[in-house]
Structure formats: C-alpha cells, structure tokens
Amino acid sequence: MIRFRAALVACLACCILVAVPALAKEHKEKKEKDVPDVTGVWKGASDTVAMGKLGHADATDAPKFLHADWTLTIDKQDGPSFSGTKASAKAKETVLGVLDGHKIYMVDDDGTYIGQVTGKNTMVVKYLEAGKDSKVASITHYRRDENK
C-alpha cells in the first residue's frame, strides 16, 4: 500500500510539473493577444483649456479655451510598450507609452496622457500638464487610418 501511495504521489507530481509550464505559456500567449496594436498614424482634434507658456499655442496669462488638430504617430511597439511622436501645426514632441489592456498611459516632454483604446481604429486620450510655466487640461478623440 505504501508503494502504491508513493507511486501515486510521484505520478501526480510529474503531472503538475508538466502542466504548470504549459498553463503559464498559454496565459502569456493570451495576455500578448490582449495587447492592442496601436502602431500607425492617428489623427484627432482636441478640446483644451490652457494658460502660460505653451509649446503648441500662443502664450496666455489667463485660461484660454483652444481647439487643435493633432497627429499621433506610433512607429514602434514591443508588447505593451510603444514610442512615437505627437505633432500639431506648431510643434512636435516624442511620446513614450504603455498599454494595460486597452488603457493607455503616455508621457512627453512636459505632460502626462491617460486614455483608452475604444475600438480597432479609435482612442480617447486625456492630457494633463501642471507646472509653474504652463498648465493644460485636454481631451482628444483620435482615429487611425482605416488601412491598419
């Protein structure tokens, strides 16, 4: 009876040792599939309130309501991490970001972005910049070229 129990325990241990790596691989593959591809050229229009020395608009001492067109180009992505540029008619900045599922987190030279991929070719991004020289709060609805 002791031999039978030892053989049973050994058999169960082997099954667990074989199954755990397979389950881990399956979980990793599923997680990688859940990360959306955000590479490409995204165009959007923003609704913004800003004041101070602004990189993409004329400086203002009082809060000013602005509307601007933007191009977000994400040219590199490795899993959930990505990089690219954000450009207006007046300036261009490098952006770095990560995805957590469909949530987007980015930074540029002076601000932070939090957003959501809302569809295969759409996303909504909020931008916040807080400092002595400038303050910005903005929301932009982006659409990617349909060919992606």
Image (spheres, rainbow, N blue to C red):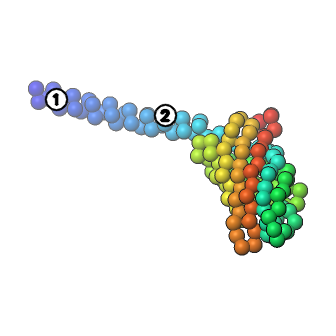
Pick the residue in front: 127 or 148.
127
Judging from the image, what secondary structure is the residue with disc 2 in? helix
Counting from the top left corner in percent of width and height, residue 83 is at 70, 53
> CA separation, marks 1 and 2?
31 Å
Q: Is residue 23 left or right of residue 132?
A: left
Residue 102 visible from this viewpoint: yes
Residue picked out by circle 1? 5
Q: Is residue 124 above or below residue 68?
A: above
Rendered residue at 10%/26% (across/down): 1
Counting from the top left corner in percent of width and height, residue 85 is at 77, 55
Which one is earlier in the sequence, the residue at label 1 or at label 2? 1
Residue 83 visible from this viewpoint: no
CB-based contact (under 8 Å), mark 1 and mark 2:
no
Q: Is residue 22 left or right of residue 135?
A: left
Pick the residue in front: 44 or 27.
44
**Rendered-image quadrant of the C terminus:** top right
Judging from the image, what secondary structure is the residue with disc 1 in? helix
Residue picked out by circle 2? 26
